Amino acid sequence: MNLIQFEKVSHYYNNKAALKDLSFEIEDKKITAIIGKSGSGKSTLLQIINGLIRPTKGIVKVFGNPLDYDKLIELRRKIGYSVQGTGLFPHMSIYRNISLPGEISGDSKHDTERRVDTLMSFVNLPPSFKTKYPYQLSGGEQQRVGICRAMLLEPPIFLLDEAFGALDADTKKSIHAELLELQQAEPRTIVMVTHDLNEAMRLCDNLMVLHEGTIHQYAPKNEVITNPATDFVKLFIEAHRD
Ligand SMILES: Nc1ncnc2c1ncn2[C@@H]1O[C@H](COP(=O)(O)OP(=O)(O)OP(=O)(O)O)[C@@H](O)[C@H]1O
Ligand SMILES: [Mg+2]
């Protein structure tokens, strides 16, 4: 049984449907990319997984059970979440920014230190950065710090919402490579939202194409490319593929 399951999930904002009757599972320990135009419902779908949004209808199962909206703190400990802009605390050092979830959870200092070192080396951040502050880092470096923080507690699920959107092409490429390396070393269930088809193709195993709140295709990435299920998917690929 997969960790993330949607059963007939719909979500409405002020009577307007953002997601329409979606049923699917996310394959464990793979990278699933959700792609679609602005307003297609991607961020809404992602935030339903970690309980930030409670859907109007349907059942969302995460870790095998329907989401318990009274226990979201516990849930989020097990779900890393990274968004564009990273949400780093400007007045805290890089080390504290990364280690904060461990501090809050009461993990031992020694274990946290080791984990921070491991993660920083995966994303190629030099140890000397630990005492720096976010403003002293480039956008790409800050994004890497955000990834380290999201991965600190080794969450089985990792959600990324346009996390690399603001980065230049070269920085994106190196972070992509680092993420894939981390995924090989510590496989987890990753769901990433992007409107960049080429980024999705570099990173994902499975690709979900969302359009106006419905799934047009959800399949291994190569199948989507070679065998688009709808005209929308076909045109989207033609317009966006490098
Ligand atoms: N808090 C909100 N209140 C009302 N409508 C909302 C709210 N959040 C999103 N919507 C609407 O729901 C639809 C889906 O929004 P969502 O943010 O999920 O899209 P998205 O695919 O992530 O878009 P983008 O690529 O621009 O981030 C859009 O039409 C949006 O205007
Ligand atoms: Mg969005």
Image (cartoon, rainbow, N blue to C red):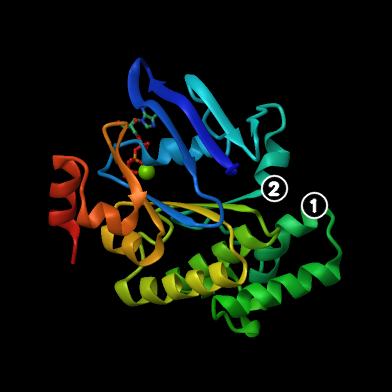
Q: Is residue 218 left or right of residue 177?
A: left
Q: Residue at x 54, y 25 (%)?
A: 59
Residue 122 as seen in the image, left or right of residue 24: right
Kindly check if marks 1 and 2 are in contact, taking CB atoms under 8 A apart as contact.
yes
Quadrant of residue 204 in the image? bottom left
Q: Judge from the rendering whether residue 128 lies leftward or rightward of residue 8; answer left or right.
A: right
Residue 125 occupies which quadrant of the picture? Answer: bottom right
Q: Which residue is mark 2?
A: 77
For this orientation, the residue located farthest to the top is 15
Question: What residue did someone put label 1 on?
Answer: 105
Foreground: 194 or 190? Answer: 190
Q: Residue type at mark 2?
A: Arg
| Pair 1/2: label in front | 2
State the image coordinates of residue 223 (x, y, percent, origin top left): 28, 54
Q: Earlier in the sequence, mark 1 or mark 2?
A: 2
Q: Position of residue 191 (x, y in %)?
A: 47, 51
Q: Residues within 10 Å of mark 2 (few under 14, many from 20)?
A: some
Along the line of sight, which residue is nearer the eye, 89 or 211?
211
Q: Label 1 amino acid?
A: Ser
Q: Secondary structure beneath disc 1?
A: helix
